[in-house]
Amino acid sequence: MRLLRADGYRQVLNMSKTENESNLGKKKLKRKASGFEIMYRAVTAVLAVAVFPVAYFMNLIYYAFDSTNITNLINNIGSILNSENLLEGLKNLLAPSGSAGQQVTEITEGYICLAKFDEFKSIINMASSGKDVNIRDVLFGNAGLRPLVISLALFAAVIVLALVILIVSIFKNKPKLIAALSGAGSVLGIASDVLFVTRFANPLLKGTTTIGSLIGSDSMVFQLIGDVVEIRYENAFFTVLFIMIAILVWSLSVIIVNSDDKTERAIKKAKKAEKKAKKAQKEAKKAEKKAKKASEQLKNERESKKSES
């Protein structure tokens, strides 16, 4: 019984020694790799921070539509006012498209930027006969704009993931977690672009939906505006997507390098040794309890024998 008890204490001492050695080994190894870890976290944080000014200040959406009708109307009204023959001027105004020499093909284009969104809203209000258009009601109250809303929500989720990546990179060295977050952001960004193109832009380009129906206004200006020639995500969107992919590639490269690094392997071995030491500690405690129990039983037996004698 004494040997069993001594073996239990010996296992505890050996376990403590092994655990302390593994902890010291991990601290030394971490100290050697700290410079690279700091560089990785700094680069990741800089890339994540860049997402916010890019998304806010750069152009998000590009649009171009055929404004030939309204341009020709303005030109023909001007010709009436400057014409000596009023009947001739009215004839030019009512002439079929392409029959008058004054017909001009005109493309109007512009950009939507979050930093200058108030300017875009003022243009919409002006085109809506001066009515104050509530952009939020337009976006959420029109089924035709639902794909756009979902697409923008996915883009907003990418920006939120960039914020999470920034926080993680500041406080922790977690390349695997950052790779997962940036990978999710890249997938959401691609899904946002696909949804924008297939469900929102293509119907406008094909003429199945009109600008007036989307805005929810029957203003004469919207009726005169022709078909949408082009609408797409612009630099802000694709730059944010590129940054997320860059963070993903950067994190994956760090993971691959660390997997082949002797230091990283030694850290993993130290962690395994620590787990084994903890397991040995539990077994030693169990053995110690058994030894104590056996010792108490032996002591009780001796006392009972003495009392009998």
Image (cartoon, grey):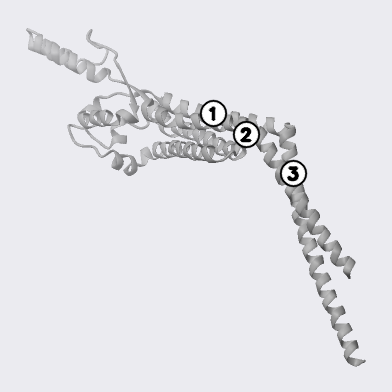
> Would you place residue 286 above or below residue 300 in this image?
above
Residue beneath the point at 48% across and 36% down: 162
Helix, strand or loop at mark 2: helix
- Return the disc, 1 or 3, that comes first in the chain's sequence: 1
- Please tell me in which quadrant of the rendered image residue 39 appears: top right
Q: Few, some or many C-alpha atoms within 10 Å of disc 1 (few <14, some 14-19, many ≥20)?
A: some
> Would you place residue 151 above or below residue 1 in this image?
above
Give the mark toward the camera: 1 or 2: 2
The amino acid type of the residue labelled 3 equals Ala
Of residues 285 and 204, the one drawn nearer to the viewer in this rendering: 285
Label ID, residue 43 = 1
Q: Position of residue 94 (x, y in %)?
A: 18, 17
Q: Residue furthest right?
A: 309
Q: Few, some or many C-alpha atoms within 10 Å of disc 3 (few <14, some 14-19, many ≥20)?
A: many
> Would you place residue 104 above or below residue 298 in this image?
above
Helix, strand or loop at mark 3: helix
The amino acid type of the residue labelled 1 equals Val
- Return the disc, 1 or 2, that comes first in the chain's sequence: 2
Give the mark toward the camera: 1 or 3: 3
Residue, disc 2: 34
Seen in the image, is 119 located left or right of residue 154? left
Residue, disc 3: 270
Label ID, residue 170 = none
Q: Position of residue 275 (x, y in %)?
A: 74, 51
> Would you place residue 89 above or below residue 293 in this image?
above
Seen in the image, is 61 located left or right of residue 221? right
- Residue 221 in sight here: yes
The amino acid type of the residue labelled 2 equals Ser
